């Protein structure tokens, strides 16, 4: 049997080399471009009349306004009265509500179509948290206006320690290598560094120091500190990800509420911004409890086929096979995660909306609104959640001078809603229209984005993108 196994190994290796050669012979940027992406059109000047908008800075509803849009920006805001401004197209919105476009600050993008789907659900900006070369291409294409999708901010490849790193992450074991990678990722055009929580402390400090020198933001997996460092080491990050890591790290899986409150009080001292990512834990809880009945409710056809396989084999199957004891524990842990989020809110820790969409079987766009729903279930007020999804995100990204609220001269990324979102947050998931850089997208165009999202890249192209990353990081 040994010679046969060896022969099969050689055949598989030859097939892989052939596939790589084919992919290298045809540039991925050409090969992978879908032909059904929605176009960017030159936005016409608009006057949105008879609207109420949410001032996310104050929580006030500003009623009966006319909002002028010109050249993709908010040109003026005034009462809904006759105006002497030049003749432009007026849309009477008859008392609709307007909020800034939403941000999902923790997603994993495996396909261009995800960006169209997020946009179709009112998420006008996303922060991708595991960068690959394809994300830099997509950023450039979006900047050039080649197709319509959410604004994309992307982290670097994930920097991780040797103990737990897997093939999709960049292992770093020396401070010198860490500094070199920070410089390289800044040069490549990534928007931030993503640092995992299992790095060696000297490597972690090198990443942080080099990033600070370059004014290059860093987001860290886990609000808990790296082994061997104090909580003070987590200062000055763009954000800290996953409240689950508070429970599993410093609380050591304890349901001790007093201990949790004390730890969050210490965390508050470093003035952090935290992305809870409740949706991903809710998703695994549902998988473990409802099994395939839950899977049958999900739009799996919107997920990239390669990552659907990867997620199924490495995460989803684990939870589908969970025991009743595991289900009971998951329910207890999820309830406690809600308590952690509520305590963060009670202590006025700045929160972000981040769903971890793209992990497990979490569909783009829908997952953002699940995160919003769960934050409300945890007890966070609607205005605090809306702030987390708009102005807090823009502030974390350092773009609040041009995005994140409804103010004159800011980019016209907006949602038009039928109800007051401060009374019904679910209206955010069903916008009448989405405005992207001044481009009006009505129900028909939003449905077109959703339909396009049901046709992600094929397996061949997806494997090519993955190989591009793996080969590039091995050199």
Image (cartoon, rainbow, N blue to C red):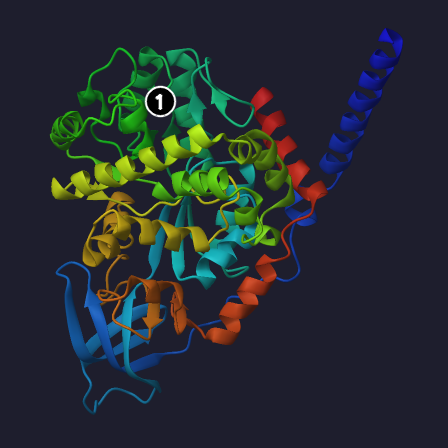
Q: Is residue 218 visible?
A: no
Residue, disc 1: 197
Query: At 31% across and 13% down in the image, what residue appears?
Result: 201
Of the 4 image quadrants, the one containing the N terminus is top right
Query: Residue 5's image quarter?
Result: top right
Is 446 situated above or below 268? Answer: below
Is 274 situated above or below 167? Answer: below
Q: Is residue 243 visible?
A: yes
- Find residue 249 and report its horizontal and vertical position in percent: 29, 22
- Find residue 247 and report its horizontal and vertical position in percent: 28, 27
Query: At 25% across and 86% down in the image, what residue appears?
Result: 85
Q: Is residue 119 left or right of residue 87?
A: right
Is 342 situated above or below 222? Answer: below
Query: At 60% across and 27% down in the image, what residue appears?
Result: 470
Q: Is residue 24 left or right of residue 282?
A: right
In terms of secondary structure, where does tag 1 sit? loop
Of the 4 image quadrants, the one containing the C terminus is top right
Along the line of sight, which residue is nearer the eye, 272 or 17? Answer: 272
- Find residue 293 and report its horizontal and vertical position in percent: 55, 48
Query: At 50% across and 25% down in the image, what residue appears?
Result: 169
Q: Is residue 313 left or right of residue 123?
A: right
């Amino acid at each position: 049997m040994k010679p046969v196994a060896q022969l099969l190994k050689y055949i598989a290796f030859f097939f892989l080399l052939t596939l790589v050669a084919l992919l290298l012979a045809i540039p991925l940027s050409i090969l992978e471009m879908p032909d059904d992406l929605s176009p960017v059109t030159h936005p016409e000047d608009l006057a949105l009349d008879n609207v109420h908008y949410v001032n996310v800075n104050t929580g006030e509803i500003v009623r009966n306004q006319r909002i002028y849009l010109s050249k993709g920006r908010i040109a003026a805001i005034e009462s809904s009265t006759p105006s002497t401004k030049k003749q432009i197209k007026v849309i009477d919105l008859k008392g609709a509500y307007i909020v800034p476009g939403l941000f999902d600050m923790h997603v994993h993008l495996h396909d261009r179509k995800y960006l169209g789907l997020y946009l179709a659900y009112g998420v006008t900006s996303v922060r991708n948290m595991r960068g690959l070369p394809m994300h830099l291409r997509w950023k450039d294409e979006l900047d050039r206006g080649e197709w319509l999708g959410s604004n994309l901010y992307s982290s670097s490849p994930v920097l991780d320690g040797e103990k737990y790193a897997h093939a999709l992450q960049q292992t770093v074991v020396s401070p010198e290598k860490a500094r070199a990678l920070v410089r390289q990722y800044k040069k490549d055009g990534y928007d931030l560094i993503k640092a995992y929580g299992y790095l060696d402390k000297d490597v972690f400090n090198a990443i942080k120091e080099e990033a600070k020198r370059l004014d290059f933001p860093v987001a860290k997996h886990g609000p808990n500190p790296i082994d061997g460092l104090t909580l003070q080491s987590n200062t000055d990050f763009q954000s800290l990800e996953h409240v689950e890591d508070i429970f599993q790290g410093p609380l050591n899986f304890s349901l001790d509420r007093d201990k949790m409150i004390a730890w969050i009080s210490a965390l508050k001292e470093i003035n952090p911004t935290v992305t809870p990512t409740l949706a991903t834990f809710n998703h695994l809880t549902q998988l473990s409890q409802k099994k395939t009945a839950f899977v049958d409710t999900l739009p799996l056809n919107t997920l990239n086929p390669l990552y659907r396989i990867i997620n199924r084999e490495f995460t989803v199957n684990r939870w589908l096979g969970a025991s009743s004891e595991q289900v009971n524990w998951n329910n207890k842990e999820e309830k406690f995660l809600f308590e952690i989020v509520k305590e963060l809110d009670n202590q006025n820790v700045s929160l972000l909306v981040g769903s971890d969409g793209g992990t497990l079987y979490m569909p783009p766009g829908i997952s953002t609104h699940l995160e919003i729903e769960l934050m409300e279930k945890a007890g966070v007020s609607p205005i605090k959640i809306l702030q987390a999804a708009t102005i807090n995100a823009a502030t974390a990204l350092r773009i609040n001078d041009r995005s994140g609220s409804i103010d004159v001269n800011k980019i016209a990324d907006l949602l038009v809603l039928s109800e007051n979102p401060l009374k019904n947050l679910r209206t955010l998931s069903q916008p009448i229209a989405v405005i992207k850089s001044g481009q009006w997208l009505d129900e028909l165009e939003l449905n077109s984005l959703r339909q396009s999202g049901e046709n992600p890249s094929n397996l061949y192209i997806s494997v090519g993108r993955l190989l591009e990353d793996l080969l590039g990081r091995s050199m």
